[in-house]
Image: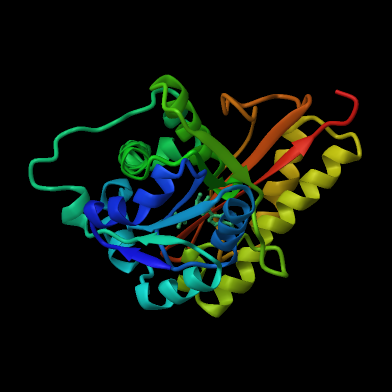
Amino acid sequence: MKRAATIRDLDRSLAPARKGGRRIGFVPTMGALHQGHLALIAAAREQCDTVVVSIFVNPTQFDDKSDLDTYPRDLKRDEKTAAGAGVDVLFAPSVDEIYPESFNTSVNVEELTDLLCGAVRRGHFRGVTTIMAKLLNIVKPDVVYMGEKDYQQMVVVRQMAADLNMDVEIAGVPTVREPDGLAMSSRNALLSSAERAAATVLSRALLIAKDMVSEGCTDSRTLEERIRLMIAEEPLVRLEYLNIVDPERLRDVAEVRGEAVIAVAAHLGDTRLIDNVVVRAEGA
Ligand code: AMP
C-alpha cells in the first residue's frame, strides 16, 4: 500500500493507474476505520482495479467544536487496517494541504440539506459537499463508495455530482451493524458502557418498524408512534428527530408507498448517533 500525505504524492502514486486507464474506486472516510468502512473498501476492491481510501477529519463539516476535538483519530492503526484490506493508496492529508490560508470557496446543495440532520447541524452539509467536491477533483475516481448509514449524506453528494456534471458514479453500500444491531460508527467508541447498551434501542426500534411495514402497516404516524414509544423507554437516549421520508427527496411521507427511509438521530450523553432503515411496502 502506498501512503500519500500531499496531493503531489497522491498524483504520483496514482499516475500508473491513471495512465493505464484503470478503474479507480474511492472510499472517503474520517478514519477510526471499522467494519462499516471495510465493507465500502471490499465493494471497491471487488468492482475496481485500484482502491484509494482517504482519511481526513474535515473541520468544515463539524458544527460543534468539541465534537471535532473528541473525534477518534488513530492513523497508525488505520494504516494497518487499510493495508490488510487491500487498499492500494491511502491518502491522509493535513488540514493545511486541503485548506490553505487562501481557501475561499464552498459548495452547497440547497433544500435537501435543510432537512433531517441539515435542520439541526447548520453548515454541516456545506462542509461535506465542499470536501467531497475537492476530494473528487483530487482523486478523480470512477466510482466513489458511500455508506447508507449516512443516507442523507449519500443523497446530497449524488445531487451535487449530478448538478455539477461530475463524471463519477456514487455507489451506496448497506449499513454494517454490530451483532446486537447497533450501526457501526467511529463515534460508538465515545459511548460509556451504559450508553452503549442503551444505544441498541435505535436499531431495535427501526427493525421493528421495518417488520411492521413488511406485514402491511404503511401509516407513518403509527410507525413513528411505535418507534417513539420504544425509544422513550431508554432514559439515556434523547431522540433528536424521527422522520419517514421518500428515498430521493427526503420529504416526509404520510404513508409508505414503494420505498421509504426511516431516519433517526439521538443523543446519548455528549454523543450524537444516527441510524436509518430502508423499508419497502409490498405490492405498492
Ligand atoms: P465516516 O468515516 O464516518 O465519515 O464514514 C466514511 C464512510 O463510511 C461514509 O460513506 C459512511 O457512510 C460510511 N460508513 C460509516 N459507518 C458505516 C456503516 N456502519 N456501514 C456502512 N457504511 C458506513
Residue 114 percent location from the top left of the image? 42, 29
Image quarter of the N terminus: bottom left
Model colouring: rainbow
Q: Can residue 233 be seen in this view?
A: no
- Compared with 4, 249 (above or below) is above
Q: Residue, x 58% and y 50% (percent of image)? A: 149
The image position of residue 272, as x and y in percent, is: 46, 57
Given residues 78 and 52, the one toward you in this image is 52
Q: Nearer the viewer, residue 121 or 100?
A: 100
User: Residue lying furthest left in this view?
Assistant: 102
135 displayed left or right of 266: left
Residue beneath the point at 41% across and 27% down: 166
Looking at the image, which is closer to me, 150 or 48? 48
Position of the C terminus, as image quadrant, is top right
- Residue 249 is situated, as x and y percent measured from the top left of the image, at 57, 24
* Residue 13 placement (x, y as % from top left): 34, 57
State how many labels appear.
0
Side (left or right) of 96 relative to 234: left
Relative horizontal placement of residue 225, taking residue 53 as reference (left or right): right
Please name the residue shown 47% across and 40% down the image. Answer: 21
Point 68% across, 61% down: residue? 201
Q: Is residue 53 above or below residue 221?
A: below
Query: 74 or 12: nearer the eye?
Result: 12
Residue 5 visible in the displayed image = yes
Left/right of residue 61 with respect to residue 155 in the rendered view: left
